[in-house]
Amino acid sequence: RADVSDAAQVRAMVQAATAKFGRVDILVNNAGITMPKGLLETSEADWDRVLAINLKGVFLCCQAAAEAMIAQGGGRIINIASTAGQAGILSGPAYCAAKAGVLGLTKCLARAFAPHNVQVNAISPAMIDTEILYWRTPAQWKDTLESIPLKRLGNPDDLAEAAVFLASSGGNFITGATLDVNGGLYMG
């Protein structure tokens, strides 16, 4: 465990994983927070905190893990983005900006690390049934479910199985891609 917005803690986390397992084969950047506020209600501190965890944290973890992966001859990096970074949402400009940044960073790193056999992909979920959604009112829940073509929230296993696929031999020829796990909410 580490505060992903702190470079020293991230380096220590990767070093501890390498010491325990001998190598780092897979990194899943899944840390994330949101501040469900509109632009005018979002403070600079809110903005900075969301970007520190959701974007800077991905950068720091990728940097630390990629170093180990390049040295060992390969690996997989899977960044968890969001449909909010693809389509935008009214109640989270910092979250949208950070997740859009994750998508751009994924493409950049996929190109940079491909010669080193490090594949970098993103998963872009929407409405996964986790605590990050629990701020919604009953009316917002109703609207949310009506907006999803599959008419249900995703569950954490939906997201986990997508990550397992990208980390498995099934993902051997995939890099720089975004896998949408969103029940059809965003088809872009």
Image (cartoon, rainbow, N blue to C red):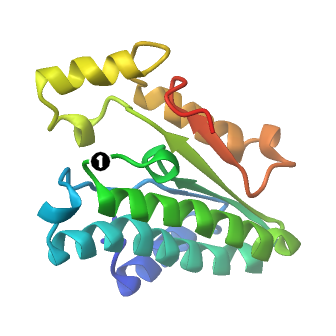
Q: Is residue 128 above or below residue 4?
A: above
Q: Residue 131's x, y, as percent? A: 23, 38
Residue 6 is left or right of residue 124, and the answer is left
Q: Residues within 10 Å of mark 1 (few under 14, many from 20)?
A: few
Image point (42%, 49%), residue name = 88
Q: Residue 40's x, y, as percent? A: 16, 64
Image point (48%, 45%), residue name = 87
Res 1 quadrant in image: bottom left
Outermost residue, front direction? Answer: 40
Q: Is residue 91 above or below residue 64?
A: above
Res 21 quadrant in image: bottom right
Q: Residue 28's x, y, as percent? A: 53, 55
Q: Is residue 2 visible?
A: no
- Classify the position of the C terminus by image quarter: top right
Res 19 quadrant in image: bottom right
Q: Is residue 2 above or below residue 162?
A: below
Image point (31%, 24%), residue name = 144
In this orientation, which residue lies closer to the viewer: 45 or 129? 45
Secondary structure beneath dot 1 equals loop
Q: Looking at numbered disc 1 in the image, what kind of residue is underneath it?
A: Leu
Residue 115 is left or right of residue 147, and the answer is right
Residue 164 is left or right of residue 57, and the answer is right
In this orientation, which residue lies closer to the viewer: 7 or 12? 7
Query: To which residue does mark 1 refer?
Result: 90
Residue 42 is left or right of residue 52, and the answer is left
Q: Residue 48's x, y, as percent? A: 26, 76
Outermost residue, bottom direction? Answer: 8
